Image (cartoon, grey):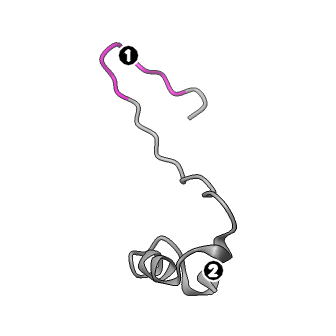
Amino acid sequence: MVGLMLKKGDVLRTVGAGGGGWGNPADRDPALVERDRVEGYVVADAAE
């Protein structure tokens, strides 16, 4: 967005990735990991 010129009344919306979470992911409830996989927040390989 370098050089992007905004005028009065323009709206700039940015969306970024979420944070890294809290604690050791291996300690998470497996059901919550599965829910994240089903909802598309993480791929199966990363959930293992």
- Judged from the image, the secondary structure of the residue bearing numbered disc 2 is helix
Q: Is residue 43 above or below residue 16?
A: below
Q: Where is residue 45 shown, x and y percent of the image?
A: 62, 86
Q: Which residue is located at x 54 percent, y 53 percent?
A: 18
Q: Which mark is residue 7?
A: 1
Q: Which residue is located at x 53 percent, y 78 percent?
A: 29
Mark before the other along the chain sequence, 2 or 1: 1
Query: Where is residue 40, by image quadrant?
Result: bottom left
Q: Which mark is residue 42?
A: none
Circle 2 or circle 1, nearest the eye: 2
Q: Where is residue 11 shown, x and y percent of the image?
A: 35, 27
Residue assigned mark 2: 46
Q: Which residue is most to the top?
A: 8
Extent of the magenta region: 4-11
Check disc 2: other Cα within 10 Å, few if <14, some if 14-19, many if 20+: few
Q: Is residue 14 magenta?
A: no
Q: Where is residue 28 shown, x and y percent of the image?
A: 58, 74
| Amino acid type of the residue that numbered disc 1 sits on in the rendered structure | Lys
Q: Which residue is located at x 59 percent, y 81 percent?
A: 47
Horizontal side, residue 29 vs residue 8: left or right: right
